[in-house]
Image (spheres, rainbow, N blue to C red):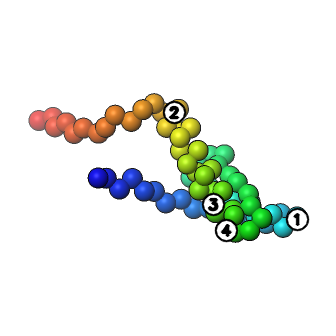
Amino acid sequence: MLDMSRKFHVVIQRDEDGIYIGKVPELKGCMSQGKTIQELMKNMKEAIELCLDVQQEDLGKFVGVREIEIV
């Protein structure tokens, strides 16, 4: 079984109301928020999964990778 895990950076800011806001620079428009860092990170995981699903739909369904040699 292939390990399909990926890692992303979450840039975290805190707004004037004390809410944590997270953004993922690698995924355009991928952001979420939470009252605590733990809640933010839980919400970010869900947001990243949704962003990846949308991104995959935009690219089409992955079929595979093949190698070809030209001599």
For residue 42, the mark is: 3
Q: Which residue is located at x 70 percent, y 69 percent?
A: 37
Secondary structure beneath label 4: helix
Secondary structure beneath label 1: loop
The tag earlier along the polypeptide, 2 or 3, is 3
- Residue at the left extreme, as displayed: 71
Asked if the residue at tag 3 contacts the one at tag 2, i.e. Cβ–Cβ closer than 8 Å, the answer is no
* Residue 11 as seen in the image, left or right of residue 21: left
Q: Is residue 71 above or below residue 46?
A: above
| Type of amino acid under label 4 | Gln
Q: Which residue is located at x 29 percent, y 52 percent?
A: 1
* Tag nearer the camera, 2 or 3: 3
For residue 16, the mark is: 1
Residue 45: image x %, image y %? 59, 56
Residue 25 appears in the rendering: no
Label 1 and label 2: CA atoms lie apart by 36 Å
* Tag nearer the camera, 3 or 1: 3
Label 2, residues with CA under 10 Å away: few <14, some 14-19, many ≥20: few
